[in-house]
Amino acid sequence: MVKIVNVFKYIFLTIAATVTIWPILFVVLGSFKTNQELIAGGGLLPKKWMVSNYAEVWGGMDFSFYFFNSFVFACIAAILSALLGSMGGYVFARSDFPGKRLLYALVIGLLFISLGPMTLFPKFEMAVNWGLNSNIFTLPLLTATGLGASLFLYEGYIKSLGREIDEAAVVDGAGYYKRYFSIFLPLMIPIISTFFIIEFVAEWNNYIFPLVMTIGNPQLKTITVAVVEMRSMGDGAAAWNLLMTGSSISIIPVLIVFVVMNRQIVEGLSQGAVKG
Amino acid sequence: MKPSAIPASNRSDDPNRMRWTQIAPRFFKKHGHAYLMLLVPVIFFALFSVYPVIWALKYVFYYYDGYELHYTGLTNFKRLLNDTVFWKSLGKQAIFSLKIFIELPLAFTLALILHTRMRGKNFFRAIFIMPYIIPGSTMALIFYVLLNPYNGELNRMLLSLGWIDKPVQFLTDDRLAFLSGMMIDAWQFFGVNMLFFLVGLSSIPKDVYESADIDGATGFKRVRYIALPMMGRILQVILFLSMLNTLKSMGPYLVLTDGGPNHATEVTFLYIFHQFFGGRSSVNYGYGATVAVVTAVFLLIVSIIYFRLTKRMDYH
């Protein structure tokens, strides 16, 4: 009886897994097909492996450039978010100061206000006025919200570390900032790296923000923007295989990060559940 | 003598009173570090979190097309009242959120299966989360290709199976386009909800299951009488979060259909996007702000109602 149940379990899981992964395999394997094969249909595996698709998209269609943009954008945004979050968390966990409750209320209150894509417009105006959208290194500044939902997770993490560490450090003569940089920052590496990866993936995948911000600056396009643009670029079905290749270039890096950092990503995503 | 009767010049003689010049250094010695360290996060917070909200609250009363700005009072709200596209989009947003009824039962079932001791658990878990990890815009584009009526893979498969005799217009038929978007969104998010359910299931102490085993509770009974009630709080949170997240997302429609055909898939948040970045010739950003603010108020009301209701449930 148990065995039959087990067999059904695996059959169900396998069907669900196949349906889930099929579109992803379709892109990744389709990226190696010729255009004719893609349009004619057939099996998932390419008959002839066209590695040249990648050379064409990477070099000929500037995808190396978009890849670089995406990487810089996601990296800076993630570092900023992790650093600002951990600083805020440290102050909130270790200090009481006038205005703390007000700030707390503001942060929580803003979590409940969802203006959606509207907030992009004032940010866009700011970016234009201050010249932040002229450079891929300053563009990610606009994604930082400073204090957000992660503040409470950082705060909780530092609170769980115990006061004894502070007391020992104070005895040793470590000041407020030194305690943050040389004691808490190293201790927070697990949580910071988890948030860094989650944020990195989120910003790599971000489409709407770079889409809007690069309206007048096509040289800042990230890979997600470039991929969707490929649709209107070719003449109809003429370049479907290259579209697959471009898509695949945007997917594969996150898939690699996901496989390598699986434990941390799963942990980070699960914390998202607990925070609610 | 009343303190107020003391001339100002003598007040400093009072040992209990400190001068401002004395208070300030003490205050900064005590709190200065905290403020200085919060300075950068708070600047970002003020600029990129608070300012857009204030911007919206101001511009609801203005006409603004990027160059011209003038106060128009409640004109934007009046226009909103008569904007049938907006009111219809709210209904679409609500219907769109029904996709959680496809997504959550599937996620819960998979979580129940994966929660048991079995081989390949991490492998399956990783596969189910994968759609959530990869870029949603790229996958929306891929589905656009897959659902294409002429060379689309899905139509080709259905034709070769003999289930249909002519290609289905997945993205040009109003209802089918909408439904396709719901399915794609469910595909993308069921994995992460499964993960949340797994967290909930693992919060149930093991000995509860052991004593249930002794009592002979198996299979469905374990789910009905142990898993569901003991996960109560977490279940509520997952349900609410996924509903709210759907209510404030534009789904895959921006890339998939861009709101078409003829506004059929233009959910409210896509409508807001189009108000600002729709590429129309005559725009009024003030009106866009009005749409966004009114929508945010509706969502706030939904949240408050939800919390009221669940609070009542908790007392019983």
Image (cartoon, coloured by chain):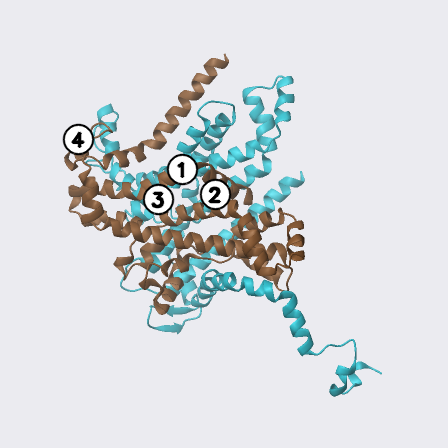
Chain colours: A brown, B cyan
Q: Residue at x 61, y 32 (%)?
A: B230
Looking at the image, can residue B95 be seen? Answer: yes
- Residue A157, position in %: x, y? 58, 47
In the rendered image, which residue does mark 3 sit on? B135
- Residue A131, position in %: x, y? 34, 67
In the rendered image, which residue does mark 4 sit on? A48
In the rendered image, which residue does mark 1 sit on? A260
Labels in figure, total: 4
Q: On the rendered structure, is B15 left or right of B199?
A: right
Q: Secondary structure at mark 4?
A: loop
Callout 2: chain: B
Q: Amino acid at mark 3?
A: Pro
Crowd tier of the residue under label 4, counting other residues whose Cα lies within 10 Å: few below 14, some 14–19, many 20 or above: few
| Mark 1 vs mark 4: in front | 1
Q: CA distance from mark 4 to mark 3?
A: 27 Å
Quadrant where the C terminus of chain B sits is top right
Q: CA distance from mark 1 to mark 4?
A: 29 Å
Front residue (pair A189, B56): A189
Callout 4: chain: A
- Residue B173, position in %: x, y? 27, 41
